[in-house]
Image (cartoon, grey):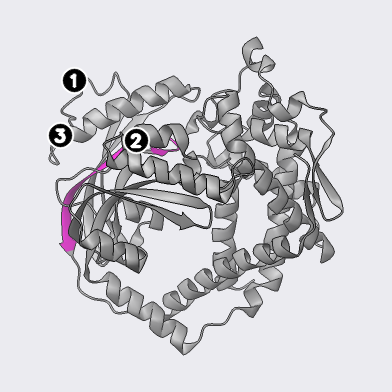
Amino acid sequence: MGDEQRMMMTNFWNLSFLTLGIALASSSVYAQTEASSPQKDSLLTTQEKKSPFEIAVIVNDEVITNYDIGQRLRFMIATTTMPRTQETMQKLFPRTVEMLIEEMLQRQEATRFNYRVEPSEITAAIATMEKEQGKPEGSFLKFLEANQIDKKTVEDQISTQIMWGKLLQQRIIPKLTVTPSDLARANQQVNNAEQKVEEVNISYLTLPMTMGRSEPETKELATIITKKLREGANFRVLGAQLAVKELTHLQPSWIPMRDLDPVLATKIAESTFPAVFGPVQTPTGYQILHVLGKRTSDYRVNVEVYFKEIIMTLSEHAQKSEVDALMVIAQDVRRNPGTCTNKDVATVNNIDDLQFKVNYVRTKLSDISPDMLSLVRPLRVGEVSEPFASPDGIRLLKLCEKTDLPSTGVDEKKLTLKVKEQKFRQEAVKYIRTLRRDAFIDMRL
């Protein structure tokens, strides 16, 4: 495998493990490793209350049972901080079924081309995840057992991701080509990134078109919600009650105007703030946007930054209530993070008692991961990021310095790799869409 293939596949595996719900942003993934309480044991999913091996979905010549769906729901809830309630399970149900269908299509396609996974590969994948989480060997299987999750449920998911990755590696990557026009467009994007950019402060909620609600019903509900919001209803309260968490962002964030639909961007540019826009139809449902303001930001990446990093550590067995409490403290710290010249935090009298850590980090924006870059790039000197979860706790970053660096020009090799990675993602999405379009799928739910 060449360097380019290796780089793209590394990114693919990182994404795959994230979709497994295992490489989570908090060490509380193992918070429930202790024996389940009788209350938890009695709370079975709706699917598990039915005949467990009754057919729920037929995908070509294979089936997904009620047991499969119930076990995946258990796993998804156990590996997040979401409450284990029937309401949570109902919200996760449509997406869970879609994930199982997609994985079955991937597994069928990989099998058709004779890709296989050895038991040792699954064992190695689990060991890697344990190591990345800083957990002892065997802890993940104990976690599954404590939460009454059939290990085959997770092993099948890991196996599918590995098989699908092998297929993409050998059938998609070798066919990727980068033309001069591709490089020209990518180079233009780099140049655009070196400019000052108009941003808007947006939060949004999404009402999905699920199996229990038709497109007209979803649109009607979205229209009613939009009307209530314009009349003064609380955006965050309504969003938390009605929207799907995975498709909703109730915490406002700054995004470039150029990334918005042109028609919507024009309407926003002509508006006064705050304002509510929508409902806007998307591939997943109907979206309602809450726009709070507009500003101009410096989007250059050839910039050196110096951060004060505040970490509020979590114990290995932290419960959801502890995480929530720490998030409240983090918001207080964000308002009074202390100065850049010392490690004090203004709102905290004794850092050691609360297990706070303060570090100073100097780096370049170009060296920061895309997810982190979107969080810190809008910051101006003296501003503090929103609290965010990491494997060792809750973090905040205060920008202390920002220095322009001399222009270094465009690295054509890196630019080519970036274009190939974009094409790889596009082709992978296109592949699964084609499989879904051509498949025989019979829902019996």
Q: Nearer the viewer, mark 2 or mark 3?
A: 2
Residue 5, how many percent across, how many down? 59, 70
Q: Does the CB distance between marks 3 and 1 fall below 8 Å?
A: no
Q: Residues within 10 Å of mark 1 (few under 14, many from 20)?
A: few
Can residue 285 be seen here? The reply is yes
* Residue at the (56%, 50%) spot, across then down: 215
Q: Nearer the viewer, residue 395 or 266?
A: 266
What amino acid is at disc 1?
A: Asn
Q: Are marks 1 and 2 in contact (CB under 8 Å)?
A: no
Give the residue pinned by disc 2: 236
Q: Secondary structure at mark 2?
A: helix
- Measured as percent of width and height from the top left, residue 182 is found at 46, 82
What is the CA distance from the residue labelled 3 to the residue labelled 1?
A: 11 Å
Q: Is residue 153 left or right of residue 295?
A: right
The answer to whether residue 37 is seen in the rendering is: no
Residue bearing mark 3: 338
* Marker disc for residue 349: 1
